[in-house]
């Protein structure tokens, strides 16, 4: 027995000596790997050589975590130097380690690097699918660095695929994880911040991107992370380029290029060269751009970044075309276009087609320019429909989510009220019983009951405030989303109108007509969403007044007569012989009547639509009858609900989104009017509004705007000068195309300083149009007032996608015209026809042309 004790004691002493020694060795290995990873931030090429030289020490280490960390560090550094063979071998070794050691962390790392490889090859969607399959394993990974790299890779790929909200979620998660890492915390935080600033830039927020760069650069300099410094300077150049500071952008690109060459960062070097060449192309320095683009193309190919190589090859082609070497340039551009087409990058393909068309036109090859423009327009139509469907789906999902949250809050509120009532009743019974037994105890119980009741009432009030806050947030989301999406629709509306005016090719007319129809549908959807949001939140859209019902109905019918005629329908109006006046809010009433008429036309494939008004007691009954598809009895009770559409609506080519009748119902409720529907499936429908009559002393005036001569105004030629202020380049291009098609001489600016500079150059405008929301933070209304102060004879208008901004209300109160995006080209033409009429223009003004 004594011998056994001695043996056990000796074994225990040996284990006690061996375990600390092994732990010390493991810590030394990890510390050396940390040093080499930090080296990769300064010089990736040198880090790869050092890691390869240390393969004997780490690649066959007994500890799986050490081997995994070594392979991840080697693969990550090789990515930055473009050593594809090393990257592929590292991925294979990580997968082998995962299989041999049953290590899910190694598998997650291998998939992360594999997804990056797919993204570089233009297969971002495949990379995201691979990452999605490892989501559960990544969240269970014991190594927090693995979880950090997984979320960082997901965020980078989602950003490159245009899914910015999802990208923001994953990048913020990676930033949060980086601050909890036991090792490499500062370096990981630096990489997360670098990707975040790039995401801000991709989300069209250059000011936020520049702020993030300025906050991140000190950390990169503190860590001597030259690789991160190079990318940050590159991104700073991109921001300066977008803001028009080309000299500053060139300096930033050169600084990034110097860091890339010193550190052997092939990918960074290729990107910096490509961006430098792009600036030279913008300046039309084609001869100087050619060698830069050739060097960028070679660098991209060395880094095996095929997407970047395609863009550099296309830019090289544009440089050759600009020098007159058309055939060689077209060959390079078409090779780049073929690659991005095969990779499925439709936005990049559409951008390259547009630039190629412009270069053809610059070279005088108008036939080739027209053919390329047709391809671009067909692709733009496809992209527009896809983006529209995606936007509608996203808005509907978020609206449904907000509705569900509101219902949950209401149910919770009702439960809290019921619980409070039960508690009150229980305490009252206790108080009464105690009062019978002892008066003093009854007084104490009554006081306690009072305190509990007050607490319950405060909880009830807080619950109500939370429910109202949720509804307000939902309405704010709808209004903000509608504003942000109006901007591209506004630009596209003006551009398509200009194309329609200039087009003489009958082959393009159906395409242009389809684009105009799609934009009208999108605009109607935005307006309906915004109106529904404002009505549900109880915001008034106007003030009640005496409304000439006959004139208002006539204006609405004129508005839709062309649409009905194009659909082969007869649209008729029947009014009483004597005048019909009602007391209502004109904006609400007009919106309700317009939605009813539009709904009747939309769901009537053939036949007619009749709009009528007749007296009923002390009221006026407005009816809209159609011979359309009708509504089943089971559906009639739900047709006024948001997003509800009948079973037969899906069979209609021009079916709406289920918002029009919901807006009618909200308008009628605020007007205090009765409304309803009678319908037979397959025979037609009759929608009606019953409005209180109003006896006006003078019924000769009407609050409904006249629209009888809209088409005749559009056909009039225009002469004069305009100044347009907008910070969106696409919107300015659309303004330029529209005003040139109308024969109007115009100058354009993106900031208030540029606008005043145009005046200093001799521009004397007859009309000034200012966008309200500018990226520079300036108020469009303040700029408009200063410009009109310098040009007292000019007329001015605000243009905005917002509907309830204080600045816009001030502008309307001061008598300024406010145009809502997307601006109707016909209405814009009518405004200019009035402002630029000879009787309204200065007689001593001389025309000064501006580009």
Image (tube, rainbow, N blue to C red):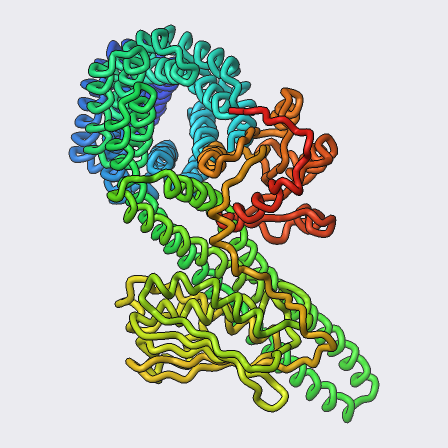
Residue 21 in view in this figure? no
Query: Left or right: 415 with respect to 112?
Result: right
State left or right for residue 829 relative to residue 72: right
Relative to 176, say whether 666 is above or below: below
Q: Quadrant of residue 758?
A: top right
Q: Position of residue 492 (x, y in %)?
A: 42, 42
**Quick one: 636 or 101, which is closer to the camera?**
636
Q: Is residue 585 above or below residue 197?
A: below
In which quadrant of the rendered view does residue 323 lie? top left
Looking at the figure, which quarter contains the N terminus? top left
Q: What residue is drawn where x is 73% and y is 35%?
A: 792
Q: Position of residue 52 (x, y in %)?
A: 24, 12
386 is higher (above) or lower (below) than 625: above
Q: Residue at x 28, y 43 (%)?
A: 508
Seen from the viewer's position, the closer of residues 170 and 73 is: 170
**Who is closer to the viewer here, 228 or 527?**
527
- Residue extending furthest toward the bottom: 436
Front in this rendered view, residue 402 or 206: 206
């Amino acid at each position: 027995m004594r011998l056994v004790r001695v043996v056990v004691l000796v074994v225990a002493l040996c284990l006690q000596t061996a375990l600390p020694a092994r732990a010390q060795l493991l810590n030394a290995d990890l510390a050396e790997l940390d040093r080499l990873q930090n080296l990769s931030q300064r010089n990736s090429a040198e880090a790869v050589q050092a890691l390869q030289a240390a393969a004997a020490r780490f690649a066959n280490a007994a500890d799986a975590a050490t081997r995994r960390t070594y392979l991840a560090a080697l693969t990550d550094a090789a990515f930055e130097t473009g050593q594809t063979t090393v990257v592929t071998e590292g991925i294979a070794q990580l997968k082998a380690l995962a299989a041999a050691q049953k290590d899910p962390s190694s598998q997650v790392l291998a998939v992360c690097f594999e997804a990056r490889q797919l993204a570089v090859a233009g297969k971002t969607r495949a990379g995201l699918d691979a990452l999605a399959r490892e989501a559960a394993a990544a969240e269970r990974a014991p190594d927090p660095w693995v979880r950090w790299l997984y979320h960082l890779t997901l965020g980078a790929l989602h950003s490159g695929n245009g899914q910015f909200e999802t990208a923001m979620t994953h990048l913020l998660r990676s930033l949060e994880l980086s601050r909890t890492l036991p090792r490499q915390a500062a370096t990981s935080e630096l990489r997360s911040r670098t990707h975040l600033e790039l995401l801000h830039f991709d989300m069209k927020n250059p000011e936020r991107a520049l702020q993030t760069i300025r906050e991140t650069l000190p950390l990169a300099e503190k860590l001597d992370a030259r690789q991160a410094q190079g990318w940050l300077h590159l991104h700073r150049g991109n921001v300066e380029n977008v803001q028009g500071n080309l000299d500053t952008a060139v300096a930033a690109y050169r600084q990034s290029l110097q860091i890339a060459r010193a550190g052997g960062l092939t990918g960074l070097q290729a990107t910096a060269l490509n961006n430098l060449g792009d600036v030279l192309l913008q300046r039309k320095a084609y001869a100087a751009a050619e060698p830069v683009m050739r060097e960028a193309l070679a660098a991209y190919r060395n880094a095996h970044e095929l997407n970047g190589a395609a863009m550099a090859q296309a830019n090289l082609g544009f440089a050759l075309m600009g020098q007159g070497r058309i055939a060689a340039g077209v060959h390079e551009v078409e090779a780049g276009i073929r690659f991005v087409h095969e990779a499925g990058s439709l936005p990049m393909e559409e951008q390259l087609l547009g630039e190629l068309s412009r270069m053809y036109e610059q070279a005088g090859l108008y036939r080739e320019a027209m053919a390329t423009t047709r391809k671009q327009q067909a692709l733009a139509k496809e992209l527009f429909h896809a983006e529209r469907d995606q936007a509608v789906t996203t808005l509907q999902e978020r609206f449904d989510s907000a509705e569900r949250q509101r219902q949950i809050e209401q149910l919770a509120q009702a439960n809290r009220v019921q619980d409070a009532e039960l508690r009150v009743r229980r305490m009252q019974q206790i108080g009464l019983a105690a009062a019978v037994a002892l008066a003093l105890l009854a007084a104490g119980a009554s006081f306690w009951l009072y305190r509990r009741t007050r607490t319950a009432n405060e909880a009830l009030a807080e619950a109500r405030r939370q429910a109202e806050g949720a509804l307000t947030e939902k309405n704010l989301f709808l209004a903000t989303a509608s504003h942000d999406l109006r901007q591209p629709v506004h630009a596209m509306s003006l551009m398509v109108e200009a194309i329609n005016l200039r087009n003489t090719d009958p082959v393009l007319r159906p395409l242009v007509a389809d684009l105009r129809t799609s934009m009208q549908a999108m605009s109607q959807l935005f307006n309906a969403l915004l109106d529904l949001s404002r009505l549900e939140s109880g915001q008034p859209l106007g003030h009640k007044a005496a409304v000439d019902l006959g004139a208002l109905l006539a204006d609405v019918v004129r508005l839709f007569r062309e649409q009905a005629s194009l659909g082969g329908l007869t649209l008729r109006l029947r009014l009483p012989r004597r005048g019909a006046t009602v007391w209502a809010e004109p904006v609400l009433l007009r919106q309700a009547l317009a939605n009813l008429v539009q709904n009747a036309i939309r769901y009537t494939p053939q036949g007619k639509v009749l709009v009528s008004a007749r007296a009923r007691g002390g009221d006026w009954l407005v009816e809209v009858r159609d011979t359309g598809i009708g509504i089943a009895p089971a559906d009639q009770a739900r047709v006024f609900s948001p997003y509800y559409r009948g079973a037969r609506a899906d069979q209609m080519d021009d079916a709406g989104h289920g918002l029009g009748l919901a807006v009618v119902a909200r308008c009628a409720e605020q007007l205090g009017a009765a409304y309803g529907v009678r319908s037979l499936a397959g025979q037609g429908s009759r929608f009606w509004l019953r409005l209180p009559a109003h006896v006006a002393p003078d019924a000769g005036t009407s609050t409904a705007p006249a629209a009888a001569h809209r088409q005749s105004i559009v056909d009039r030629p225009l002469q004069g000068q305009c100044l347009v202020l907008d910070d969106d380049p696409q919107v300015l291009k659309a303004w330029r195309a529209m005003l040139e098609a109308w024969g109007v001489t115009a100058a354009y600016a993106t900031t208030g300083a540029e606008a005043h500079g145009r005046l200093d150059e001799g521009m004397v405008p007859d009309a000034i149009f200012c966008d309200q929301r500018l990226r520079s933070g300036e108020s469009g209304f303040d700029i408009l007032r200063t410009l009109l102060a310098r040009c007292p004879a000019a007329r001015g208008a605000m243009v905005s996608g917002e509907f309830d901004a204080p600045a816009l209300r001030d502008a309307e109160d001061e008598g300024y015209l406010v145009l809502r995006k997307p601006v109707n080209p016909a209405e814009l033409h009518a405004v200019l026809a009035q402002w630029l009429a000879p009787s309204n223009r200065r007689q001593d003004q001389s025309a000064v042309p501006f580009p």
